[in-house]
């Protein structure tokens, strides 16, 4: 276990139950994470305008606004990794959370060690993606699009700009690094063993297609190889600056 320092990853926690917020913060601190806690969604969003966290842990049942709305605004304005921690275990909330950019979804009551393990797994995926990029401040050109890594945006040849969530950007980077190669869901999510019922990658692929493809139902850029995985079809040119 590590003591957090100023360079430790910063996690924002929005949770209106003080005892649960303290439990989360204490568990994270034991494993070397800094954290800040907020009792409302608006308080978290206001703080995010000044300080960028590496990850946000979001409850859905907040006193001032729905946690899914917080997630949507956070990903639009200050994209970061996100984990939903909630008592709501319905399929609709799970799917919506992933659609809006969450990296994981954990239902209360929870085991603190499992929560920390999921936080570490999410951040590890982002760190691997960032470390392997040719230029973290540049981007890539492909299929009539320019992907700006630093700004998390896609710009088409005709000037249309589309914003990506942090989760979408990480997935796109993985595909762009190995164009025309089949990547399994495990490779794309960065886990050796993936729950066969985990559809998070499939949901993110669907989101990317809606932003990239002229016809998401008949994709030309991100193709499905049934029983194997996904591939990004075409030529990728990495650019710097």
Image (spheres, rainbow, N blue to C red):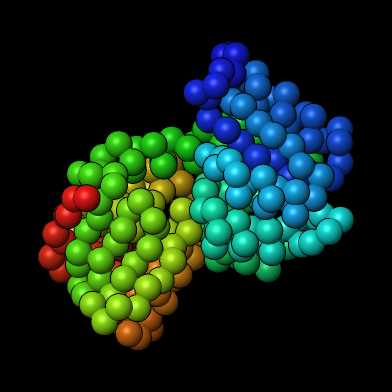
Q: Quadrant of residue 95?
A: bottom right
> In the depicted view, which residue is nearer to us: 73 or 114?
73
Residue at image coords 57%, 33%: 10
| 232 relative position to 70: left or right | left
Residue at image coords 68%, 58%: 70
Q: Where 60 falls versus 116 (above or below)?
A: below
Residue at image coords 31%, 71%: 155
Q: Where 115 falls versus 1 (above or below)?
A: below
Across and down, in percent, residue 196 comes to 49, 53
Q: Where 118 falls versus 63 (above or below)?
A: above
Residue 38 appears in view: yes
- Which image quarter is the N terminus in? top right
Across and down, in percent, residue 238 comes to 16, 54
> In the depicted view, which residue is nearer to us: 231 or 159?
159
Q: Quadrant of residue 6?
A: top right
Residue 224 appears in view: no
| 182 relative position to 104: left or right | left
Across and down, in percent, residue 148 comes to 31, 58
> In the depicted view, which residue is nearer to us: 149 or 185?
149
Residue extending farthest to the front is 50
| 220 relative position to 150: left or right | left
| 223 relative position to 117: left or right | left
> In the depicted view, which residue is nearer to us: 195 or 238?
238
Across and down, in percent, residue 48 comes to 62, 47
How many dots with numbers? 0
Residue at image coords 76%, 62%: 66
């Amino acid at each position: 276990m590590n003591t957090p320092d100023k360079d430790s990853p910063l996690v924002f926690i929005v949770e209106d139950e003080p005892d649960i917020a303290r439990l989360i913060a204490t568990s994270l601190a034991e494993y070397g994470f800094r954290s800040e806690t907020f009792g409302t969604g608006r308080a978290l969003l206001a703080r995010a305008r000044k300080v960028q966290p590496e990850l946000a842990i979001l409850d859905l049942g907040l006193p001032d606004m729905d946690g899914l709305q917080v997630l949507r605004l956070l990903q639009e304005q200050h994209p970061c990794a996100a984990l939903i921690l909630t008592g709501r275990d319905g399929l609709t909330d799970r799917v919506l959370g992933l659609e809006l950019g969450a990296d994981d979804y954990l239902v209360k009551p929870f085991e603190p060690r499992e929560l920390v393990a999921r936080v570490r797994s999410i951040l590890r995926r982002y760190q691997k993606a960032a470390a392997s990029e040719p230029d973290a401040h540049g981007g890539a050109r492909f299929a009539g699009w320019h992907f700006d890594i630093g700004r998390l945006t896609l710009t088409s040849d005709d000037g249309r700009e589309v914003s990506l969530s942090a989760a979408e950007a990480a997935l796109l980077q993985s595909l762009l690094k190995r164009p025309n190669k089949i990547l399994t869901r495990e490779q794309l999510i960065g886990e050796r063993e993936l729950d066969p019922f985990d559809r998070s990658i499939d949901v993110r692929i669907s989101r990317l297609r809606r932003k990239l493809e002229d016809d998401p139902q008949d994709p030309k850029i991100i193709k499905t190889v049934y029983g194997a995985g996904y591939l990004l079809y075409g030529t990728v040119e990495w650019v710097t600056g």
